[in-house]
Every structure is written in structure tokens, then in C-alpha cells.
Image: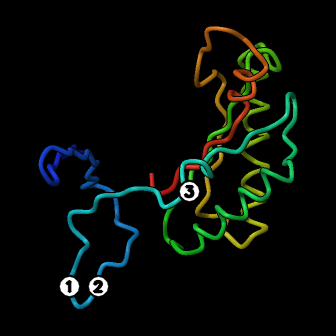
């Protein structure tokens, strides 16, 4: 993975990752030109739709989560060869031990995986895993910070 910094206009900088070892999931030919290399890969799933939240102690998908997953499925259907990785997390109050966090996180990732499969995404493209550690350590354990820890992240093309 190489990082390239490019200047646009007078002083605006943009940083993008060039993934030389990753396949490019965009159309390789547009107007007869080959745009396959180098491939600057940005997930087409909007950041606000790449995170699915859960209620405390639950792996059940809310109506809001299902709506987000419907949007994810629509994007994933446009890229039928792109692998999808789901990574589940739990907060340290609902699951105080590493084994409890791993089990609940895996259940959450599995629920998201099952929902995407039910929406037509091929099961072989999707890997789901649960972490046995929190992805963040908040300064305070407020209901808001705990809610941000109870998530499944969707990563496409990794």
C-alpha cells in the first residue's frame, strides 16, 4: 500500500491510498481507455452506512439497521466480485470478559451477514468476525460512548 499526496488548484491537498496489491472493483474500460492501474480504492459504501449499531446485549437488527443494510446491499450488488468483511464489536459493560465480547461480537457480525445474504449478496464474498476487545477506549462510559462501541463495521474490498 503506497500513499500518494496530490495538489489540486493552488494549495488544496488530497491524500489517497493506492492499493497496488488489491484488485480494482471499478469498471476498467471507460470510453475505450483502460483505467485499471493504478487503482485508487475508496469504498463506495458511504461512511454513515458502513456502521451498524445494536442495543445493549443484543444481536437483533433494528428497523434502522435493516434500512442501512438494504442500502449496503444495493451498493454491494453493483460490485459482485468485491469481498466484504464484517467486524463486530461489543462494549465492556454488556460483555466484560474477552470471551463474552468475542461471542456477542460474532453474533452481531453473523446477524449482519445473514441479512446481507437474504438480500442477494453471495455468501462466499462475506466474512464475519467478532473481536474480543473493544475498538475504542472511551474516557467516560456514558450511554452514548457505550452505544458507539456496540457496532458491526462493513469493509468492502479489503
Residue nearer the viewer, 40 or 85 = 40
**Location of residue 20 (image quadrant):** bottom left
Element on which disc 2 rests: strand
Colour pattern: rainbow
Q: Residue shown at 68%/29% (left/top)?
A: 148
Residue labelled with disc 3: 84
Of the image marks 1 and 3, the number of the one nearer the N terminus: 1
As drawn, the residue found furthest toward the bottom would be 32
Residue labelled with disc 2: 30
Residue 48: horizontal and vertical position, in percent? 60, 48
Residue labelled with disc 1: 33
Q: In the image, is residue 55 above or below residue 134? A: below
Q: In the image, is residue 88 above or below residue 136? A: below
Q: Which numbered disc, 1 or 3, marks the residue closer to the eye?
A: 1
Q: Which numbered disc, 3 or 2, marks the residue closer to the eye?
A: 2
Q: CA distance from mark 2 to mark 1?
A: 5 Å
Q: In the image, is residue 107 above or below residue 149? A: below
Residue 23: horizontal and vertical position, in percent? 34, 64
Q: Residues within 10 Å of mark 3 (few under 14, many from 20)?
A: many
* Circles 2 and 1: CB atoms closer than 8 Å: yes
Q: Residue shown at 58%/63% (left/top)?
A: 125
* Circles 3 and 2: CB atoms closer than 8 Å: no
Element on which disc 3 rests: strand
Q: Residue shown at 58%/25% (left/top)?
A: 135
Q: Residue shown at 74%/22% (left/top)?
A: 146
Residue 67: horizontal and vertical position, in percent? 77, 59
Amino acid at each position: 500500500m503506497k500513499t500518494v499526496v496530490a495538489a489540486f488548484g493552488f494549495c488544496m491537498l488530497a491524500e489517497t491510498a493506492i492499493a497496488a496489491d488489491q484488485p480494482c472493483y471499478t469498471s476498467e474500460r471507460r470510453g475505450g481507455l483502460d483505467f485499471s492501474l493504478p487503482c485508487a480504492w475508496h469504498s463506495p459504501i458511504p461512511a454513515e452506512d458502513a456502521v451498524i449499531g445494536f442495543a445493549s446485549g443484543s444481536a437483533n437488527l433494528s428497523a434502522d439497521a435493516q434500512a442501512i443494510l438494504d442500502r449496503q446491499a444495493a451498493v454491494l450488488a453493483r460490485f459482485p466480485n468485491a469481498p466484504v468483511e464484517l467486524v463486530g464489536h461489543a462494549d465492556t459493560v454488556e460483555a466484560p470478559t474477552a470471551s463474552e465480547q468475542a461471542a456477542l461480537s460474532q453474533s452481531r457480525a453473523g446477524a449482519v451477514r445473514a441479512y446481507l445474504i437474504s438480500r442477494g449478496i453471495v455468501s462466499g464474498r462475506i466474512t464475519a468476525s467478532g473481536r474480543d476487545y473493544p475498538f475504542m477506549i472511551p474516557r467516560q462510559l456514558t450511554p452514548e460512548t457505550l452505544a458507539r462501541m456496540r457496532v458491526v463495521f462493513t469493509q468492502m474490498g479489503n
